[in-house]
Image (cartoon, rainbow, N blue to C red):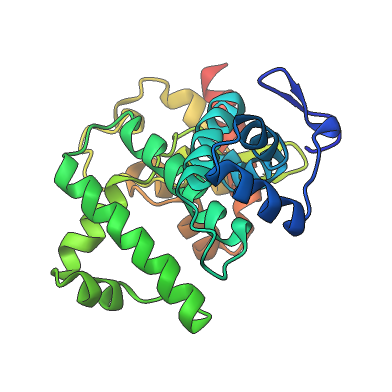
Amino acid sequence: MYNKVSICGVDTSKLPVLREAQNEKLLKAVKEGNKSARDELINGNLRLVLSVIQRFTNRGENLDDLFQVGCIGLIKSIDNFDISQNVRFSTYAVPMIIGEIRRYLRDNNSIRVSRSIKDTAYKAMQIKERLTAQNGKEPRVEEIAKELDLPVEDVVIALESVVSPVSLYDPVYSDGGDTIYVLDQVGDKNDDKNWLSEIAFKEAIKNLSQREKHILNLRFMQGKTQMEVSEEIGISQAQVSRLEKGALQKIRE
């Protein structure tokens, strides 16, 4: 992404990189009110913003938007950095940039969540990051709940509320062109009026092989997922998907 991508009209391959000593010098100048030093410091750390937004590229968000939000986090970290502390600027800036992006994603989620639940989720994520860095492993939900002094259920609900929704048409597996989507893995055990039980083309069904009939019965009459069907009849999920689609195509024809 660094070498060829243009974000917000910025050629990322031409972005400068500042050494820590240069950051320290510029930060001192910024604290003295030097505006040009502030601009140079921002431009010299845009690659840091790029490295952070790579963590969020799988959410389907516009990279330009994430970059701009990340730059806001960078500017806040410059303005709030305490040069008297023995801390590298990047160590302080990265969590600030991540926090700004997460707030943006949280507040722009298509599913509206109450402010109190969002705040709980944000605090839980901060605690999760701190405990992970402290212990070298991700904490259990119970540990996070204990830190927040909240019931485990409240923490789980809060964290789930800020997760981006998954499309039923998101691919989860591909085998030589036979793509399996989230929709293919969803079973339905509650639909008493399944379309296959009411299908009028009985002659078309009679022309299917026994294996095809069995797969359709398991999938649409018993509401099993493709994974469950593959385990029951002893073939791969990709084969189940291929046979299922072929059988349905025969019925449509």
- Determine the image quadrant of residue 188: top left
> Quick one: 47 or 171, which is closer to the camera?
47
Outermost residue, front direction?
A: 32
Q: Is residue 144 left or right of residue 42?
A: left
Q: Position of residue 203 (x, y in %)?
A: 47, 24
Residue 206 location, x and y as percent? 50, 32
Compared with 2, 142 (above or below) is below
Where residue 131 sits, quadrant-wise, is: bottom left
In this picture, residue 13 sits left or right of residue 203: right
For this rendering, which residue is in front, 221 or 110?
110
> Residue at 63% of width from left, 44% of height from top?
29
x and y percent of residue 51 in the render? 67, 47
Tell me the quadrant of the picture where the N terminus can be found: top right
Asked whether residue 173 is in view, the answer is no
Q: Nearer the viewer, residue 242 or 94?
A: 94
Q: What residue lies at 68% left-to-right and 42% top-to-bottom?
A: 45
Name above or below for residue 177 compared with residue 154.
Answer: above
User: Residue 209, how many percent across, how many down?
Assistant: 59, 41
